Amino acid sequence: MSWPLLSNLAFLGLPSSDLTGIIPLQICALPKLRHLNLSHNHLTGDLPLCLQNLAMLEVIDIHTNMLDSPIPPELGNLKRLIYLDLSFNALRGTIPSTLGHLDYVNLSHNRLTGKIPNNLAHVHYGAFNDNEGLEKADGPKRMARIILMMVLIPLVAILVLGPLIILRRRTKCMRSEIATKNGDFLSIWNYDGTMAYEDIINATEDFDIKYCIGTGGYGSVYRARLPNGKIVALKKLHRHEAEDPSFDKSFRNEVKHLTEVRHRSIIKLHGFCLHKRCMFLVYEYMERGSLFCALRNDVEAVELDWSKRLNIVWDIAHALSYLHHDCTQPIVHRDISSNNILLNNNMKAFLSDFGTAKLLEPNFSSNLTADIAGTRGYIAPELAYTLVVNEKCDVYSFGVVAMETIMGEHPGDITSTMLTSLREDMMLYKILDPRSPFPRESSVARSIVLIVSLALAGACLLEC
């Protein structure tokens, strides 16, 4: 491998490649590297200190190897790093406190010792499992305080707050019944423990219509500002929808998958409430809405220059690659469309809506489905008559979205025509969105041609 020729490489994925020896120091000569995946190999030795020089690095995934060194505190110098998975190695020493800014950390199944740093309290304890020398939280003293609180708080509640609770139940019976059962159906995190069910209700004035910013295939989406100033998006089922078994299943399916995946281009789920009287999901808020709406607004379409459009296609491609190849069990989204690609204020793209997503089973027959999921115009034709779910379904839909992003509108039924025209050296200007100036840089034009070719190849993958 000629490392100097890879200076522009952003994603390096070599999982399950039977790699041996130490991690090559040449990786540190990739200044634009953002995603490093060397998982499921036989690598030994240290984590190179020079990784701290890769300022663009966002993801380090080297789980399931044989690394046996301490974790370098210098990894904390990577300010863009959000994901670190070093589980299933033989790492020793203590956990550096410099990792507190990461969104996801997994150091389970190592030989780490000492205490878990306080600034990693947001990390689930499962991320530290099977480190026998690791002392969780504050050790015995903290446990003693917890036991004391477990005894005193119920007594205080019974003796002092009992009458108030009874009065509250009489005046706000429905609200109280829901609130007292929060532990069974409510899970909200990432807000320092300050966000609760009541915060959601108060922020939306019990889901008042004035906070509604849109409706989807089912449910409505609300914009809410929480007490800590954070703005979130809330997807809520209406009462009649919550009683529909298919909607209920989709809602729970979305929770199941979004709590298990973590990727920079997949929408972040902050929490959820699943109860027959109130069902909602709490998402990261996307200021610009969907790609569909952006492409149909002339002002926003002009703002989406070719560089931004190429990055959108790039981001969604890597999100799908993560779902198909980097998850423990492959996930097929089944509803890739411009409506389900959301944009933040910087026009970065995020894949959303996992209501129809499906885990792929090793057994082929288990991947048959009785229903056709997805959005009309984006569904792979093969699925309509075979009802077989696999990664190709997402690849086809991605191709349609890629063409839509380049053309500025849905390609419609012209895929076969374009395939023929491409063989006849179809001119690029006939494909591009006329609202954006023709790309002057040859590198941008080449990238657009590559995307169009890959999109049509994805369509041909199923149609040909």
Image (spheres, rainbow, N blue to C red):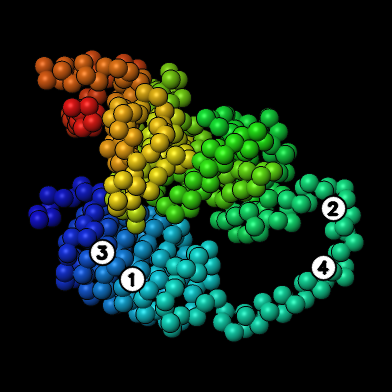
Q: Is residue 232 visible?
A: no
Amino acid type at mark 1: Phe
Total labels: the figure holds 4
Residue drawn at x 36%, y 63% is 85
Amino acid type at mark 3: His
Position above or below: 434 against 90? above
Percent x, y of residue 178: 73, 50
Please give the residue where the numbered disc 3 appears in the rendered image: 40
Of callouts 3 and 4, which one flags the residue occurring earlier in the amino acid sequence?
Answer: 3
Q: Is residue 351 visible?
A: yes
Please give the residue where the numbered disc 1 appears in the rendered image: 88
Of callouts 4 and 2, which one flags the residue occurring earlier in the amino acid sequence?
Answer: 4
Mark nearer the viewer, 1 or 2: 2
Please give the residue where the numbered disc 4 appears in the rendered image: 157
Residue drawn at x 50%, y 38% is 286
Residue drawn at x 63%, y 59% is 193
Report the disc number at residue 169: 2
